[in-house]
Image (cartoon, grey):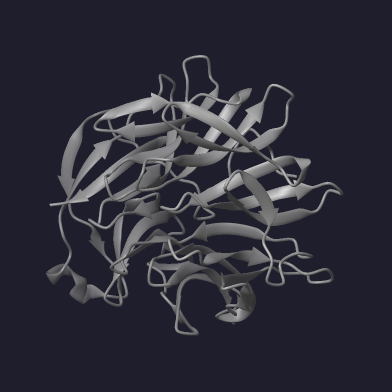
Amino acid sequence: MRDRSRPIAAGLVAFALALTACQEETTSPDVSESSPNLAATAANYTVTDLGTLGGDQAEAFAINNAGHVVGYSQTPDLELHAFLWKNGVMRDLGTLGGPTSFAYAINAAGQVVGESSTAAGELHAFLWQNGVMRDLGTLGGDWSSARSINDLGQVVGWSRGTFGSIRAFIWEAGTMRRLGGGLEKTFGRAWSINNGGRVVGDFQRPGMTYRRAFRLKDGVMTDLGTLGGNTSFAMAINGEGKVVGIAGTSPGRSHAFLWQSGVMTDLGTLGGRTSSAAAINVVGQIVGSSQISDGSYHAFVWQNGVMSRLGPGGATGINRSGWIVVNYEGHAALWKPE
């Protein structure tokens, strides 16, 4: 079981952007080392540090189409609390009675989901709306985490069951249940759900030594395959059913991918060995993180077949307008194209 004091980032790599709080600056994304012709199409961005809840660090995980951002931040007493950033103000969403909480997703209505410690010392999925944090419970064990919510209020994530196994769940109409379609007896994790109710994530059947990305549509689970390696993880799905994530390649590396119409496409890297895609918006723009040639990680945006570098760190969310959430060295920032 992982350390409960720190979340697993939505894009598998957690980063933060080091800027002076509330300060803005204009910058241009660097051109991917493999795509020098991008300079003609790259946009300028205005970068805004989201600040903190009074502590030294913050990390953002998602943004909705209204530009509202969620994540977690350190408080003055060094606790880590979920936040909602809206119109320049970061709001502490509180906890379920324990010292920590993390917000991972937000829908169009402003409903927020994530995980929080409880007064009993457990870690439970939550739904926050209208100032109230609701405990979504578990599948019978002592731990659950909500990772995505669609505009219908359906929530997905994963939970420990009565006998200790981790299972993917969907929560709707006040009830949490295991996801079906072949996931019932797998070590499953649901990372994202779109407004059509399609779910993506990763699974591991008994006896398997690796995890594979899946899509669940109309009760049928599809293994999305890999880029030639053994392992893949599906992190996000947009309204058109396009899926992004990270997959192993035949040389034993891991690259960001786009899956659509049954085909997984390698998005490449910024010159390094690995990359991962964390989010995709309705127009098909993809964000994530990639190593560059010196081994450090940089945020990227991929569009029209080209990956461009935004700056150090990792991008974890993008909305319809192309506003991007980027994290680097303990700070979260919002990148808005001019």
Can I make out residue 329 in this image? no
Q: Position of residue 204 (x, y in %)?
A: 73, 67
Most foreground residue, 334 or 197: 197
Rendered view: 129 above or below 75: below
Residue drawn 83% across and 68% down? 206
Most foreground residue, 29 or 320: 320
Rendered view: 323 above or below 282: above
Farthest-out residue, right: 163
Does residue 177 appear to the left or right of 89 in the view shown? right
Q: Position of residue 63 (x, y in %)?
A: 35, 47
Residue drawn 53% across and 27% down? 80
Most foreground residue, 29 or 33: 29
Q: Position of residue 127 (x, y in %)?
A: 53, 38
Residue drawn 48% across and 85% down? 263
Which of the 4 image quadrants contains residue 286?
Answer: bottom left
Residue drawn 65% across and 29% down? 117
Q: Position of residue 294 (x, y in %)?
A: 42, 59
Farthest-out residue, top: 77
Quarter of the N terminus within the rendering: top right
Count of labels shown? 0
Does residue 112 appear to the left or right of 285 in the view shown? right
Can I make out residue 283 in this image? yes
